[in-house]
Amino acid sequence: MKVRIRRFDGQKEWWQDYEVDAKPSDTVLDVLNRIREKQDHTLAFRQSCQMGSCGSCGMVINGLPALACQTRIGELKTESIRLEPLYNYKVIKDLVVDLNDFVNKHRSVKPWMIRKNPEELEEAPTEFKVTPEQNLTFVQFDYCIMCGICLAACPTVAIDPLFLGPQALGQAYRYIADPRDEGFEERIDILDDSHGVWRCHFAGACSYVCPKGVDPAKAIQYLKKDILKYRLLHKKRASTKPAELVQKAPPPNAPKPPPFDFKVEGGV
Amino acid sequence: MRKDIGMETLDYDVAIVGTGLAGLRTAIEVLRRDKGKLGLRVAVISKIYLMRSHSVSAEGGTSAVLYPEEGDSFELMAWDTIKGSDFLADQDAVWRFVHIATQEIRLIERWGVPWNRREDGRIEQRWFGGLSFPRATYAQDKTGFFEMRALYDTLLKYDNWDRFDENFVTSIVIENNEFKGFTAIDLKTGNFRYFRAKAGVIATGGAGQLYRITSMAASSTGDGYGLAYNAGLPLKDMEFVQFHPTGLVPRGILITEAARGEGAYLVNKDGERFMQKYAPSKMELAPRDIVSRAIMKEIMEGRGVYDEKSGLYHVWLDMRHLGKDRIEQRLPFIREIGLKYLGIDIVDQPLPIRPTVHYNMGGIHVDIDGKVLSSSGMPVKGLWAAGEAACVSIHGSNRLGSNGTNECLVYGYIVGNDVYNYIEKERPSLPSPSQNLLLAEEDRIFGKLLGKESGGEDVYQIKDELKDTMEKYVHVYRTGSEIEKAVTKIRELKERYKNIRLSDRSRIFNYNLEHALELGFMLDLAEVIAQGALLRTESRGAHARLDYPNRDDANWLKHTIALKGPDGPSFSYIPVKITMWKPVARVY
Ligand SMILES: Cc1cc2nc3c(=O)[nH]c(=O)nc-3n(C[C@H](O)[C@H](O)[C@H](O)COP(=O)(O)OP(=O)(O)OC[C@H]3O[C@@H](n4cnc5c(N)ncnc54)[C@H](O)[C@@H]3O)c2cc1C
Ligand code: SF4
Ligand code: FES
């Protein structure tokens, strides 16, 4: 089988073709390891768990951002495979992209449990009561493995580098929806911003590509609703900050925005 | 040829290597205790992104006593752990461990873990192998993942720490039995770094990658063991490698023990629930060593099923009778794994499974506070180890399922506090190691390895042969003559390793270099495991010798200690700490 990989060594970019034996039951990650171990030791890609829980191996497979360890060759139904680094990130080497901005955005929405009385988080003679039904209100959003794939599919991320993005917003909602959390007011000004929830125009690509069924697009719509409700009740303007100019130019080194009508057979 | 790149020195009060559950919990504890009082600065270092550590793969549960009023007790959990360990656990450590586990479960509940709940909103628990009470606390079948999320998120709330994602630690700097820091390669730039710190913590996890079929991550290469061993520190009980009974054929992906906790059957090719022959009362829920042995026995005696695609023999794990609802609520990830990797829906088909390498009971020799001990038995000043990298020993020769994640949490808590107390009390100053030591390490990596022009051996070829050797000769069942073959082969591979040559000479993300350094650790470790296994002429827990089928307390109720010597490891033994529970026959 032919594997075509978009490569980058810090200076130049090129496409490289490899010919590999692959069974339909092999994953794309198996194939990459075979190439690196048997043919080309210089090929760079990330991996760890090999079972879809660590988020290391996100890349663009035949035009669709996905996890290499959870994509089987058979389900691709193509003669050859085309692999690229995740879109909308700065490429460092081959399939390895820079995630610093991504992890910083995540941190900026205060993705941790907030209580009005912080001491309650430090002492635990007993647990908070959460019914199985209440668990269901947020647990889906807690599935996020921080693979960053959703940002690679998001058309808004591609044009606004300051946009918080589906992952961070989804994680803000994960805590806001958690009955144990009381941090909505602490987070609202971060989210209620022209680069926050309002930048999302609900393309839904993030939810389509998310390998863990997190559905960040849904989370963002819930956030919008919660924010509007809060602002109405508290008679505050929706945003106290003046809208900043959208940076039109894509970030340096960001490849073109992803095609939008993904229709790779088999899908993710 | 030496590539001159210069060294960057980074100063911290505490440097933590490894950010699985153990490393993250330690970091949080130091920062949480401090609250800015001493203004301690912590470096958090991992060779992959912090939140991607192997702990995310833990599936089934975390044991703790939550409901004494319903019949559980610390005594019972301690007894289960000690009996499960085949009496090689240190009982004082187990006793302390079972007490702290309870508070940890509730603490991380407050930090966000979505534990499965009872109808009344309290935390739910379930059965796991070798337990006498259903005390495995769980969050679906992604327990470790949710725990990692909660700890990682909680760490983000603190300010006084810096993250060093994708920094590969290459050595522990120790002089005069005093910890002086870690050296590392920043994979993003290829730069050499020296983390100078007053206190160091090793939380680098286990070494499943020594084997072909493993449930452990590609990053579980046992670096921490290698780092300690190279620094002249003792490793304890390394011959005890846990095989999890239910690895998905062919690659060994884990099917959690919770599947059997929820009632799954193990069935051989004749459709027989064969566990009734090996553990008539506990059946499928006997401890892992016993179930793994049983599966291998079935296969060895011709009652396994042959899988043509992989050429492997296996048995079946049958969950059909659990019904779709229960599976969706409690084992959704297992269903996803079956569908993704084999196209099998566990709702209407059984899964092909066989034992898969899963955990290292042994590790860096530490005391009950997690302080790393030197060859003299004295603690190394300023150095701790926690989690799977450390061997306290709580698990002895066989860890119970659901007792790994809690050890990480408990020891993160203990070590974090011990580190803090040490700095608060002793007010150590930043160390100043001899420059030669650091330069020699830099030259080892960038001169002797990366810059090496000669030699024809290939990193991945040697790694392949090593994995095959371990898989073939140092598996669930071992015999003296087979282990000897392994030892001979490992020595040959070690010789060949001296002749490796890297084909990637670049600096940025040079995985070829990282893999070569990992392989160095793995070869040493394989030798320690195999030789330790050869010397231990008994069967205990995960170490099952066909030529010595019985446990031999008269001669072998003791821990193995391995030290690096000029021609391979040298071995000595230390007693097991027995307080309350005398060893008895282990019947389930
Ligand atoms: C599939 C699976 C399922 C499991 N399920 C359960 C369960 O249900 N219940 C249970 O109790 N236990 C379970 N376990 C066991 C438990 O998950 C592990 O023992 C535990 O997570 C280990 O955590 P750790 O913090 O010690 O290390 P790890 O999580 O393995 O982390 C190691 C860290 O060290 C870093 N590191 C390693 N080498 C270097 C280096 N040279 N330089 C820099 N950084 C380095 C890595 O990057 C990583 O951050 C399971 C294990 C497996 C394999
Ligand atoms: S929301 Fe989904 S796609 Fe985005 S980072 Fe999380 S797991 Fe990945
Ligand atoms: S390797 Fe962990 S998600 Fe693919």
Image: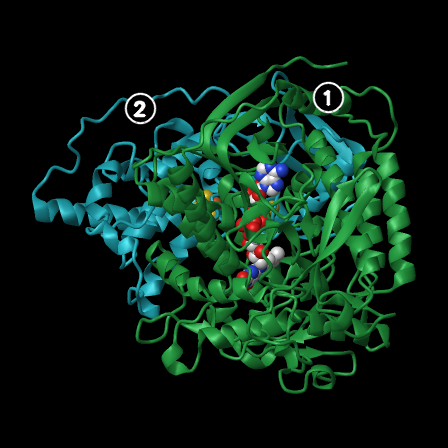
Chain colours: A cyan, B green
Q: What residue would you read off at disc 2?
A: A246
Label 2 neighbour load within 10 Å: few <14, some 14-19, many 20+: some
Q: Which residue: 83% across, 30% down?
A: B500
Q: Is residue A198 left or right of residue B298?
A: left
Q: What residue would you read off at disc 1?
A: B505
Kindly tell me whether residue B149 is visible in this rendering: yes
Residue A217: numbered disc: none
Q: Which residue: 79% across, 47% down?
A: B570
Please state the chain letter of the residue tagged with numbered disc 2 in the rendered image.
A
In the picture, the quarter occupied by the N terminus of chain B is top right
Quadrant of res A91: top right
**Secondary structure under badge 1?**
loop
- Nearer to us of marks 2 and 1 is 1
Please state the chain letter of the residue tagged with numbered disc 1 in the rendered image.
B
Mark 1, ligand 1, within 8 Å: the answer is no
Q: Nearer the viewer, residue B473 or A259?
A: B473
Badge count: 2
Q: Nearer the viewer, residue B275 or B389?
A: B389
Residue B136 x %, y %: 49, 70
Dot 2 and dot 1 within a common chain: no
Q: Amino acid at mark 2?
A: Val
Spatial CA distance of label 2 from label 1 is: 41 Å
Is B449 above or below relative to B483? above
Kindly tell me whether residue A268 is visible in this rendering: no
Q: Is residue A174 left or right of residue B292?
A: left
Is A162 above or below relative to B361? above
Q: Amino acid at mark 1?
A: Arg
Mark 2, ligand 2, within 8 Å: the answer is no
Residue B554 x %, y %: 76, 72
Residue A79 x %, y %: 73, 43
In the picture, the quarter occupied by the C terminus of chain B is bottom right
**Secondary structure under badge 2?**
loop
